[in-house]
Image: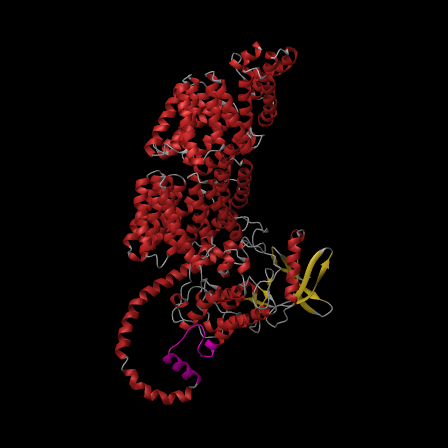
């Protein structure tokens, strides 16, 4: 061994001396950590097997392999040279390129680049013909030796293929897994579609290498949030190279853009075909990438046949004179384009330096050069970049501003709002100083600051930023029409979030009109605005209108993207949510399950979109009464979010809040409270004390604590929830009404019926103003109002209220649902209090049967039904069945609440009361004494249950 020369997640490479042959070699070892996993060992062995097939002068070959002291290794040829990009950046004897090249390309002759690419393409084509697909072609995986010959290496992501180009049966990657390097990644790779990766994917990477070397920029910008980068790779076409670097041949444009076509079928069919076309260009022959006219053919013929061409020029001279007038007119047009070209060059300088910095930032995730690990998070990469940006880009304000903007956007996506604000405000200040107040880059910063403010529920600040961005964009003219439409759409979303539905609709109508005007250019942007507008309609309960917009968006997406795409999955998911809200649970489940399956197929098992689908499907399962499946979906979604976002992201808090509410219903109170507390802490830390989402988590936590018989602790949490909702959303808002209802229920439980009823009726008035007085939210409030009426012994009023609840629930869910069973139980309780034992028994049995059928016999709601039915049976002297009901209910409540809970003690007291009434006093005494001990510890000494137990 001489020295370590490289390290990656799948291997450590050493330079070594082979004593038997006297030559230098490179030895690659599988790291111990990787060797511990069968998949890593299989991938390493597969790399050896694949590369061993390839005996080609431009592919680094395998010399030997084996296992030494338990460590997997293989030896390969040692190439003394420079990487592809380092080699092209070195001084060369070829003539210097024109001064219009972007950074990094100023001294690179495009013909020199293309000669190398052709040789590399030959080697890659050889690999394809021998059943090996590289999948990670990039400059650092090509070494140029001292003779100027390229050598392709690092087949760590290679995949076996059929020589015809289709994937072989055995592969070590799964659909949804991203393999490769962003700047050179094909659209099919960016979508995680390993099943669609083919030889044309390697052709794309070769085209990307050539494009970047010729222009100084990658074909697709890789700065910004990862989801945006992947979307650009999948859908945005690269600009023509000649628009970045002047005086490039249109043939170069044609060849590179053909290699980089979004559709694999439109690219060169093989790497060999790409190499052949490059050589046609180098030999001044017509290329296959574009059809050419007779004049161009003549010029190329002249270059190849100079002596013959001299005779022909005399005849052509007369014809040339006739074209002078046209030439003069073209010259004037060219002059007018010079300034635009110079501006493009300046933009290229900024982009090139920005890209260079971002590459170094991303390199920190490379175990060979970065933090020494291969589990580096996006947060760590961003923090590392933030710590060095001031020093590395101190003399380059444009690049610094661009990187600050990217970091701000990244921190915003991570839910780190304070860090996001710091970088975005710094970027804005630099851009204003460089360009003045009216510039597209300034508007870009303002718009992102608006989105940050909206995420923090600072709706007025968001409005101010968006309005200023829009003013700038409109002052710059029609060329920014797409940016204007995007900003107007964001303004609409901001108004939607703050509850100004009429203002939101007006803005969405404006944005939609702009999107329709340019739909032929960007149909998917129209689909996006339709989706956002539909969501507003959903909140306004305009369900038919929302469905129409979702379906129009889906039709546009399917025409543009085919039958399966992440955007299509999102729209199908939105339709599922719509059907859920409408109470059409079968169609909701069908659409949400379809969206979930599509996302698993396209994105894999660890993607945030998958977590969102799981949450929405969990809601449907909860409404069907399938609580176990709902909890399973919530937990899987939370696990995905924790892995991808960390433990403190506000999006995680949303799923945790929903899970807490579900667990409260199933009686898993300890886990429910833990999730609710964590959600409150996360949202308070990330969003501050005034965000409406914080109010939702406060409501859930307060409700859980209240259910656990700690009303004094619950009340301040619920009062804060009302205060936050009112401040953030106003009095007339559904969330404010719901918070008031939760507080009212807590007050009712504390024996404060007057304040409780006032709050409930105020909340119901709010829903009436919103036109939502026949919704689930209204049913919840009415149910609690019925309980207050019971407390006041207004039994007729309570029954009328519960009957209204029942009609709303049946409109939403049909004849069978856990909430319907609960409402029937409530009506039965009123009948029992009125002394109507026949009605009470009939309805208790109906409710019990429905609950058993929907949620099984081990549910807390079933226990509640059993206890209530036991009361009726006891009063009717059916002691045997009453005792049976109580004995079935007691272990359910003990499992859910524990032995020290007053509800458990009261069931024990009821169980003791039955044998007293049946004349079995000795048997009853033990049960009553045990219950009384717990009740005295957990309840006021003069409360009615304690007194009744003493009396018993």
In the rendered view, tell whether residue 191 sits above or below residue 421.
Answer: below
338 lies left or right of 859: left
399 lies left or right of 604: left
Residue 743 lies in the magenta stretch: no
Tell me residue 871's x, y (percent). Answer: 54, 18
In the rendered view, tell whether residue 19 sits above or below residue 812.
Answer: below
Tell me residue 517's x, y (percent). Answer: 31, 56
Tell me residue 180's x, y (percent). Answer: 54, 58
Say which residue appears at 31% left-offset and 47% top-offset. Answer: 509
Say which residue appears at 66% left-offset and 64% top-offset. Answer: 49
Which quadrant would residue 852 be assigned to in this image?
top right
Tell me residue 195's x, y (percent). Answer: 55, 59
Say which residue appears at 36% left-offset and 46% top-offset. Answer: 533
In the rendered view, tell whether residue 216 sits above or below residue 691.
Answer: below
Q: Is residue 150 visible?
A: no
Q: How many marks?
A: 0
Q: Nearer the viewer, residue 109 or 165?
A: 165
* Location of the C terminus (image quadrant): top right
């Amino acid at each position: 061994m001489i020295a370590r020369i490289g390290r990656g997640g799948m291997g450590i490479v050493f330079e070594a001396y082979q004593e038997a042959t006297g030559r230098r070699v490179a030895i690659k070892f599988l790291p111990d950590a990787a060797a511990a996993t069968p998949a890593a060992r299989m991938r390493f062995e597969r790399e050896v097997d694949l590369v061993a097939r390839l005996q080609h002068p431009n592919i680094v070959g395998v010399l030997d392999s084996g296992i030494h002291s338990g460590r997997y290794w293989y030896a390969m040829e040692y190439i003394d040279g420079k990487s592809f990009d380092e080699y092209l950046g070195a001084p060369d004897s070829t003539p210097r390129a024109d001064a219009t090249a972007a950074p990094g390309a100023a001294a690179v002759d495009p013909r020199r680049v293309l000669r190398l690419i052709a040789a590399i393409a030959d080697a890659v084509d050889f690999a394809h013909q021998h059943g090996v697909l590289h999948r990670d072609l990039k400059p650092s995986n090509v070494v140029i030796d001292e003779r100027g010959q390229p050598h392709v290496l690092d087949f760590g992501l290679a995949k076996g293929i059929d020589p015809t180009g289709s994937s072989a049966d055995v592969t070590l990657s799964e659909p949804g897994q991203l393999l490769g390097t962003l700047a050179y990644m094909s659209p099919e790779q960016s979508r995680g579609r390993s099943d669609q990766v083919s030889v044309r994917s390697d052709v794309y990477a070769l085209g990307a290498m050539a494009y970047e070397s010729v222009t100084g920029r990658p074909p697709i910008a890789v700065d910004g949030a990862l989801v945006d980068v992947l979307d650009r790779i999948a859908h945005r076409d690269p600009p023509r190279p000649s628009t970045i670097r002047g005086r490039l041949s249109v043939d170069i444009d044609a060849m590179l853009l053909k290699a980089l076509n979004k559709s694999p079928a439109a690219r060169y069919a093989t790497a060999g075909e790409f190499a052949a076309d490059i050589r046609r260009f180098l030999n001044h022959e017509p290329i296959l990438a574009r059809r050419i006219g007779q004049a161009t053919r003549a010029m190329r013929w002249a270059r190849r046949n100079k002596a013959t061409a001299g005779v022909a020029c005399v005849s052509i001279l007369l014809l040339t004179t006739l074209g002078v007038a046209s030439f003069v007119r073209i010259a004037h047009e060219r002059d007018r384009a010079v300034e635009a070209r110079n501006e493009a060059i300046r933009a290229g300088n900024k982009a090139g330096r920005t890209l260079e910095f971002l590459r170094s930032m991303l390199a920190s995730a490379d175990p060979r050069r970065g933090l020494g690990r291969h589990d580096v998070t996006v947060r760590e990469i961003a923090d590392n970049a933030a710590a060095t940006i001031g020093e590395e880009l101190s003399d380059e304000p444009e690049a610094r501003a661009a990187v600050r903007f990217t970091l701000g956007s990244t921190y915003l996506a991570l839910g780190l709002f304070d860090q996001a604000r710091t970088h975005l405000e710094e970027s804005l200040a630099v851009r204003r100083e460089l360009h003045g107040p009216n510039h597209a880059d300034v508007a870009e910063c303002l718009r992102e600051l608006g989105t940050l403010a909206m995420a923090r529920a600072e709706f007025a600040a968001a409005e101010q930023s968006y309005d200023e961005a829009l003013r700038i964009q409109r002052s710059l003219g029609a060329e920014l029409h797409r940016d204007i439409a995007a900003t107007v759409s964001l303004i609409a979303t901001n108004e939607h979030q703050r509850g100004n539905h009429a203002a939101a609709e007006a803005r969405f109508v404006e944005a939609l009109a702009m999107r329709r005007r340019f739909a032929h250019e960007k149909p998917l942007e129209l689909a996006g605005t339709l989706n956002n507008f539909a969501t507003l309609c959903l909140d306004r309960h305009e369900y038919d209108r929302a469905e129409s917009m979702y379906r129009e968006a889906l039709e546009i997406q399917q025409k543009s993207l085919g039958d399966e795409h992440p955007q299509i999955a999102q729209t199908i998911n939105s339709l599922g949510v719509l059907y859920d809200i409408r109470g059409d649970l079968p169609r909701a489940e069908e659409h949400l399950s379809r969206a979930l399956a599509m996302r698993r197929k396209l994105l894999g098992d660890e993607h945030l979109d998958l977590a969102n689908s799981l949450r929405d499907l969990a809601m449907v399962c909860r409404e069907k009464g399938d609580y176990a499946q709902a909890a399973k979906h919530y937990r899987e979604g939370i696990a995905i979010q924790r892995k991808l976002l960390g433990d403190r992201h506000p999006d995680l808090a949303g799923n945790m809040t929903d899970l807490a509410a579900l667990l409260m219903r199933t009686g898993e109170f300890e886990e429910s409270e833990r999730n609710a507390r964590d959600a409150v802490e996360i949202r308070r830390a990330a969003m501050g004390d005034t965000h409406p989402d914080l109010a939702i988590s406060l409501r859930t936590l307060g409700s859980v604590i209240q259910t656990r018989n700690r009303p004094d602790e619950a009340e301040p949490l619920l009062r804060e929830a009302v205060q936050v909702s009112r401040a953030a959303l106003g009095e007339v808002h559904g969330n404010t009404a719901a918070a008031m209802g939760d507080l009212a229920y807590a007050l009712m439980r504390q024996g404060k019926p007057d304040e409780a009823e006032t709050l409930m009726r105020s909340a119901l008035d709010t829903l009436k103003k919103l036109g939502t007085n026949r919704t689930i939210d209204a049913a919840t409030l009415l149910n609690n109002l019925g309980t207050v009426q019971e407390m006041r012994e207004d039994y007729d009023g309570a029954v009328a209220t519960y009957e209204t609840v029942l009609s709303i629930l049946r409109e939403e869910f049909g004849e069978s649902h856990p909430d319907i069973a609960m409402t029937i139980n409530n009506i039965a309780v009123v009948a029992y209090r009125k002394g109507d034992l026949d009605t009470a028994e009939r309805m208790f049995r109906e409710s019990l049967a429905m609950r058993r059928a929907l949620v099984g016999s081990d549910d807390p709601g079933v226990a509640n039904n059993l206890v209530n039915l036991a009361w009726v049976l006891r009063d009717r002297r059916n002691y045997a069945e009453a005792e049976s009901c109580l004995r079935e209910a007691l272990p359910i409540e003990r499992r859910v609440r524990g032995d020290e809970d007053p509800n458990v003690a009261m069931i024990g007291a009821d169980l003791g009361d039955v044998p007293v009434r049946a004349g079995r006093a000795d048997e009853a005494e033990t049960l009553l004494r045990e219950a009384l001990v717990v009740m005295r510890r957990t309840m006021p000494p003069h409360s009615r249950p304690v007194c009744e137990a003493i009396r018993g």
